Image (spheres, rainbow, N blue to C red):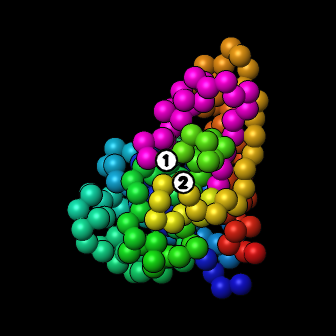
Amino acid sequence: MKQARLAIFISGSGSNAEAIFQHFQTHPSIKVELLLSNNADAFGLERAKKFSIQTKVFIREQFRESEEVLQWLKEAEITHIVLAGFLWLIPSYLIKAFRHRIINIHPALLPKFGGKGMYGMKVHEAVRSSEDSQTGITIHEVDEKYDEGRTLFQAVCDIDQSDTPKEIAEKVQRLEHLHYPRVIEDWITQ
Ligand code: GAR
């Protein structure tokens, strides 16, 4: 297999990005090349530096009103894009350039608790307010709409009656770190 070169997009903590760095550190054909963020204060940028992964920060105009980000991806010869807690909609020029080669993780069982504005703790608060006794993760391909691309993988966890949104978030993050790197690997290699 030709070498795959990943770019990871984040907006915040980057704990999933770190699980992915670790997983592919010694992989023979998949390499994490670049970490990009719309947030200069994202902790994930520090995590990337520890793994000697190149980082780039961009503002909305660079992302939406020019194709500068696409230029960076081309220069780094990126083959696949991984979204890991990235909160902006992906513009159509990027979707077109990477059709079926962008993957996202969502911290609930889509199609429930998805769509615009549903990210991070907001998702877990909505799950808590519902009658649901289970939640989980969804890993899916990305198209022009929020949270609507082809589902590749879901995993489920139970919600106890006493769980707070924070405790639900912790359960879901454990599932994310466990599964996301391996699902990315299967998606690329199959
Ligand atoms: C993760 O739980 C991810 O599923 C979620 O943001 C968190 C990022 O955590 N993504 C979304 O809500 C996207 N709609 P991390 O920065 O520690 O990886």
At a point 54% along the width and 67% down the height, the residue shown is 102
Camera-side residue: 38 or 76?
Answer: 38
**Quadrant holding the N terminus:** bottom right
The answer to whether residue 25 is seen in the rendering is no
Q: Say left or right for 99 vs 138.
A: left
Residue on which the image places disc 2: 147
Q: Amino acid at mark 1?
A: Gly
- Residue 156 horizontal/vertical position (percent): 75, 40
The verdict on label 2 being within 8 Å of ligand 1 is yes
Q: Amino acid at mark 2?
A: Asp
Magenta part of the protein: which range? 116-139
The answer to whether residue 105 is seen in the rendering is yes
Q: Residues within 10 Å of mark 1 (few under 14, many from 20)?
A: few
At a point 66% along the width and 19% down the height, the residue shown is 163
Q: Say left or right for 118 vs 56.
A: right
- Residue 98 horizontal/vertical position (percent): 50, 76
Sequence-earlier tag: 2 or 1: 1
CA separation, marks 2 and 1?
6 Å
Q: Which mark is residue 107?
A: none
- Is 176 drawn above or below residue 169 in the view shown? below
Camera-side residue: 118 or 5?
Answer: 118
Secondary element under disc 1, as helix, strand or loop, is: loop
In the image, farthest residue toward the bottom: 2
Residue on which the image places disc 1: 115
- Is 97 drawn above or below residue 60 in the view shown? below
At a point 62% along the width and 59% down the height, the residue shown is 140
- Residue 71 horizontal/vertical position (percent): 34, 78
In the image, farthest residue toward the top: 162
Disc 2 + disc 1, Cβ < 8 Å: yes
Q: Say left or right for 16 vs 184.
A: left
